[in-house]
Image (cartoon, rainbow, N blue to C red):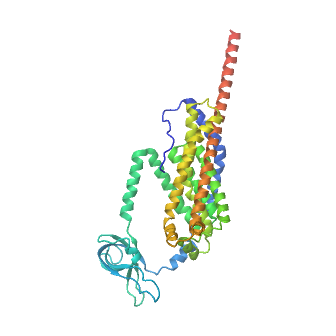
Amino acid sequence: MTHSHLAIDDTEPTPQVRAQRRRAGRLLAIVLVPVALATIVGLFVLWPDGAQSAARQEATNQIIPGTVFVDGTVLAVDPYDCSGTPSPGSPVPATLTCADVVVELADGPDAGASVSVQIPAEVYLAGFGVGDGLRLQRSAPIEDVPVSYSFTDFSRETPLTLLSIVFAVAIIAVARLRGLAALAGLGFAFLVLVAFMLPGLLNGESPIWVALVGSSAIMFVVLYLAHGFTARTTTALAGTLFGLALVAGLGSWASSWSRLTGLGSEENLTLTYLTGQIDPAGIVICGIIVAGLGVLNDVTITQASAVWQLHELAPEMPARRLFSSAMAIGRDHIASTVYTIVFAYAGAALPVLLILETLQRPFIDVVTGEAVAEEVVRTMVGSIGLVLAVPVTTAIGVLLVKSTARQEAQTSASDSALRTRSGTTQSEAG
């Protein structure tokens, strides 16, 4: 996110404020505890049984026994012209350059040996140089066919590891304990994604229920880890869960109405080929729900903080004015976050947009095509869920602070009346 949350007053709250927050937390718990229990039950029912999925079995069956992946370092690069011969009447193709590279193997059965690997033109365009790390596939010998190596990707372990370390250090250095808690929450979210959501989808479970249960579990842990067990956090959690449910329902309806098949990407086609258990259209909906987690968390925690901060600064402020004041902050946040969503999805779909621009397709065909339409629906549904979560979270926060304030006023009035009667009785006895 390129915007910041509302600044929170870090001064020590008064005993009166702390008591009010505790009462608000108890009120919200009445609603959220059943949701938490339903999430636990959903995790128990949908949790993968550990058996290998049909998709993984099919993928494993297609791998030749003895095939392994190894790392290597480029020792030499020998480019050559690999342009095809044009057929009669066809335009002359652009010049294509491929390369033969010599790679020293870093691990595997032939560690230390040097092998020659052919690099296709589309990969050579990325640029090759001596010292580059490559990831190669070693194919075991079959009858008269000797061992062969082929390029699969660049080796990125070192840069990604260093970048992750810098990322973690920067967050902890600036946010300190909250940053450490946020990283722990991120680790938990990754665990839920890898151990629950991905296997559940591969096993043919309902994508919507897998996404809702997994996302709910992530939000319960991530929000409380990063922001603590406070009424503000609980208010934000309630708004986030509302937004997730809204995105799930709206995404399901919009995907069906728009006739999104989920087959607009090569990845979904591969999944469909590997197993018949996975519903590609359901994967689209699941992706819409998961993609909305970050922005929903961002706006709801900001709105909850806005309501509580404004109320604690001006406890006498009427509920209507408190709502409108907090929504003024929310509207600014909505505007910046919607830009974030749209540009993020536009960036993800940039290669598709470039291809369509190259083919000079009509604009209406570009927008309504499966590949772009999927991103359009994802953007619209996520934005609608985001926009509606803001007033809902704000309303929940206002209702809580005002209801707990009334309870406090009634309790104080009762205590005052009791003390008055007690003092009158003592005077009469004297």
Which residue appears farthest toward the bottom when viewing the image? 144
Q: Position of residue 142 (x, y in %)?
A: 42, 87
Q: Residue at x 48, y 45 (%)?
A: 4
290 relative to 180, above or below: below
Quarter of the rendering occupied by the C terminus: top right
Q: Viewed as shown, does residue 276 lie left or right of 106?
A: right
Which residue appears farthest toward the top when viewing the image? 430
Residue 20 appears anywhere in the view: yes
Question: Between residues 190 and 398, which one lies in front from this camera angle?
Answer: 398
Question: Between residues 347 and 253, which one lies in front from this camera angle?
Answer: 347
Q: Position of residue 399 (x, y in %)?
A: 65, 38
The answer to which image quadrant residue 269 occupies is bottom right
171 relative to 263, above or below: above
Q: Residue at x 61, y 36 (%)?
A: 322
Q: Residue at x 52, y 43 (%)?
A: 228
State how many labels appear: 0
201 relative to 312, above or below: below
Q: Position of residue 307 (x, y in %)?
A: 58, 38
Q: Position of residue 350 (x, y in %)?
A: 49, 65
Residue 49 appears anywhere in the view: no
Q: Viewed as shown, does residue 181 lie left or right of 366?
A: left
